[in-house]
Every structure is written in structure tokens, then in C-alpha cells.
Amino acid sequence: MKSQISLAFQKCKKENRPALLTYTVAGDNTKKKSLEILKSISEHVDILEIGMPFNAPTADGSQIQNSSYRALKNGIKLKDVFQIVKNYKKSKNAKPCILMGYYQMVYRYGERKFVKKCKQVGVNGLIIVDLPFPDNKEFSKLCKKNSITFVQLLSPTTSRERMKKIIASSHDMIYYISMLSTTGGKLKVSPKIILKNYNKIKRINKTKNLAIGFGITKKTIASLKKADGLVVGSALCKAIGQAIKKRQNPVTNLNKMVKGLKNKVL
């Protein structure tokens, strides 16, 4: 039986377009608003990445860090993240959800307990940014046993030999980090080079769904639409921050923004 993530990619391929994946931090800027944002953008999104706010997000740039800090300042804990996902999954247009975060949070909660809780609330996938292959082998198996997609990461510096091993051990989706930077950095590599690297990965295994992330904005998304999936995160976190600063409604602003992104890849 195919996973919800796999089915989402399949649907997009039939429509001859990439899957649109968005990233927002759970609880930014409040638990209520965060849930409203997820429900609102679902209209245009294929897969939702939901960040678990963490006080030392080393892989993230300033926009996602600020998003995390806003959530933490408002007292958002891991139990609240699970509650947001659970409530979101009850909504009418709920899409597959991937929780994204750092291993320390999983370790403190307990691996088995964490994965079991993810399954209970309806999490479809996990990205643990600081748990690389092969250290993630056992955790990946645990996820698979619980019907949760563990998303492996590849970068421009991943050797071909290592790439083959990671792809072979991957589940329904692989995340390709387009450039060596923290999230939200300006795209330092041309879309042409990113797609060239992307195609090298696809030639190893054409069946695995491969999403590109890092540096993707409204300006660059259309030039990368040959990919299986495209992830936009920092731009959305920035928009939430700007809406709060200007005393605007982040729900309305993000819906409009994500609709614009979707139109760029149709």
C-alpha cells in the first residue's frame, strides 16, 4: 500500500507539475494562528512540512530561527506541536504532513515513544536534519514499521557511492539540499546547475520522489519546476514575521503567497 506522501507525488506527476511543499514552524506565532495557516494554505499545497520549534536550529537561517523563537516565546512545546498536527488532520482538506526538526527533541522524548505519537496524531513523514545516514538506519527502520516515511537528505557534496547507499535505504521521498548554506540563503547556484545535479540523482533511481529545498522563492521556483517536488520555507516564515510587524493577518497573507507559488509551477 502506497503512503500518503507517495500518492501526493503521484497525483502531481499525473498533472504534469511538481509537488509544492511548504514549511512553517508549529506555533508561529500562536498555536491557534499556526493551525489556521495550515488549514488555509492546504488549498494550494500538496505536502506540508511542519517545523518543531527548537532553541538551537543550526541548519536554519535567520527567518526560520526567528519563526522558532516566536513559537518558543509563546510557550510552544512538543505536545503542542502534536496537538496542532492532530487538529489539522481532522480538517476537510488535510494534506500529508512531514514533521521536521532536530534529533535532541526526539532523543529527549524517546525514539519509540516519539514515533508512536507521530503515528497516533497523523504524521506521515519525518525529517531529522542532524541524524545523517548511516547513523539513522535504526531510526529509519522504526519509522517504516510505523508506516512513517523517513526522509533522507542529499547535498551537492554527497559522493556518488554514498548517494547510492542513501537512495537504496530511503523510503518514499528524498530531500535534495540545493546548495551549501543554511535555509533561506540567497540562491548562490544557478537553477541550471541545480537541475543538472538533480538529474544525476534521478539517474541512480528514477522511482524515488526527489524534492529540492533551500533558496527557493517566488522568483526562482518556476525555473526548477522539472523537479518532483519543490520546498518553500524561509519565504513563508519571513512573511509571517512581516505580517505580525505590520499588524496584518498572517493567515490571509500566506494563503495569497502560496497561491502565487502554486501558479508559478502549473
Image (spheres, rainbow, N blue to C red):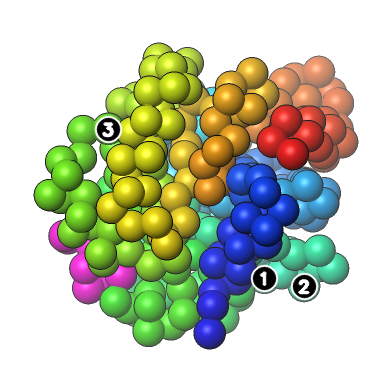
Local SS, label 3: loop
The residue at which mark 2 appears reads as 90
The residue under the point 53% across, 48% down is 228
Q: Decide whether residue 199 is among the magenta residues.
A: no
Classify residue 241 as left or right of residue 260: left
- Tell me: residue 208, above or below residue 61: below
| Placement of 146 over or under 60, stated as above or below | below
Looking at the picture, how far across and down is residue 111, in whole percent? 32, 72
Three-letter amino acid code of the residue under disc 2 = Lys
Does residue 135 show up magenta in the picture?
yes
C-beta proximity under 8 Å, tags 1 and 2: yes
Which amino acid type corresponds to the residue marked 3 in the rendered image? Pro
Left or right of 216: which side holds 96? right
Q: Say what secondary structure mark 2 lies in.
A: loop
CA neighbours of label 3 inside 10 A, class few (<14), some (14 to 19), many (20+)? few
Q: Nearer the viewer, residue 39 or 202?
A: 202
Label whose residue precedes the other's in the sequence (3 or 2): 2
Any part of residue 109 in sight: no
Residues 11 and 42: in front is 11
Mark 1 = which residue?
86
Dividing the image into 4 quarters, which one contains the C terminus? top right
- Disc 1, SS: helix
State the CA–CA distance, disc 3 to disc 2. 38 Å
Q: Does residue 169 appear left or right of residue 122 in this picture?
A: left
Residue at which label 3 appears:
156
Please state the horizontal and vertical placement of residue 90, each as a whole percent of the image.
Answer: 77, 72
Alpha-carbon span between mark 1 and mark 2: 7 Å
Quarter where residue 230 is shown: top right
The reply to whether dot 1 and dot 3 touch (C-beta < 8 Å) is no
Q: From mark 1 to mark 3, how far is it between C-alphas?
A: 35 Å
The magenta segment is 132-140
